[in-house]
Amino acid sequence: MKRVLVAAALAMAAACKSVPAPAPVAAVFVPEAGPADAGVAAPSLADEAQAAWDRRASDPSALDRSISLWEQAALESASPASVLLSAARARRERLERSVQTAHEVSRAEVADAEACAAEGHRSWAALFPQATGQVVQFVQIEQTGAEALYLEAVCTSAWARMQGFSLLIDRRTQLMGALTRVSGLSPQLDGAGAERELGALLAALPSYAGGNLREARAHFDTAIRLAPREPRNHLLLARTVAVKSQDRALFENELHTAIESDDPAVSALARELLLRADDLFDPAEAAQPTPGGPAK
């Protein structure tokens, strides 16, 4: 159950061999311009990172390289917000790949989640420094900072779950504020990811810390309404609200929807979870309805 919740926070928000931390990248060698190439600009670190990112589907090492190059570029950039956003986006993808195949939380996964959250924070803070401080003023973060704020929240949630639920409880107010702001700014972002993550968070928290299955279900319903074809919305609803409320009908219906999606990774996770149904549900309670509405 702990492993399932770890994968959900990411998946998700949303959706286990670990991917090793990126190896140091050698300095990029750029030959001196000669008569034939005079006037042709050498590719920047950001250009090199983007090229590696574009190759990540066919080259397993390209994702690691893109992260290292973007982080180097951020150190040299006078306007690092977009570079940091790209680095955070890439780290989150590597983290998702890892937790989809790993069986134990690794140090590399914890490091990726922590770095992703930090880079997301630095990205939006570079654009809206007036919103930073001991208490973040989420209302001052505008549309251009929405994805960075979202990545900070998603990766912070993942990091907290990996470390223990007490940290998730400690950060619940910040996470709720960030995700609520993102939902208002960009409701369709990442397949209605802010609503999906709000649902997962409210389902995971104990009631004394603000957890509420009825409210969690409402956020998932909103996510599915906004992005009905996003399979992570269905997968995460099944593995959080359905399991915690012991609604097996909802669990099976949502997983079958996820299985039929075009996303092979999510489909595989849904199949694996469906096979564990007998272990996750008490037969005497399997027919109980889900708070917030009937099973779909």
Image (tube, helix red, strand yellow):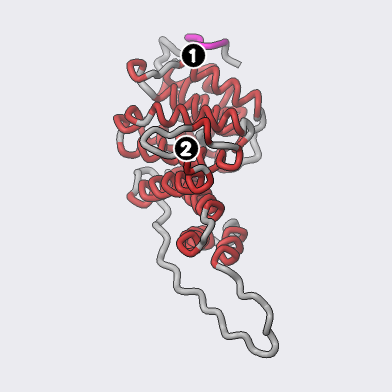
Q: Give the camera-side residue of 267 and 211.
A: 211
Decide if residue 23 is on the left or right side of residue 250: left
In the image, residue 289 lies in the stretch drawn in magenta: yes
Residue 86 in the image, given as x and y percentages of width and height:
54, 52
Q: Residues within 10 Å of mark 2 (few under 14, many from 20)?
A: some
Decide if residue 6 is on the left or right side of residue 139: left
The stretch in magenta equals: 287-293
The residue positioned 65% from the left and 23% from the top of the image is 225
Would you name the residue on which mark 2 appears? 131
Q: How far apart are labels 1 and 2 at the CA level?
A: 32 Å
The residue positioned 58% from the left and 37% from the top of the image is 142
Q: Residues within 10 Å of mark 1 (few under 14, many from 20)?
A: some
Discs 1/2, front? 2
Would you name the residue on which mark 1 appears? 214
Element at label 1: helix
Residue 285 in the image, given as x and y percentages of width and height:
42, 11
For the question of whether residue 278 can be seen, the reply is no
Indicate the amino acid at tag 1.
Answer: Arg
Q: Which residue is outermost to the bottom?
A: 35
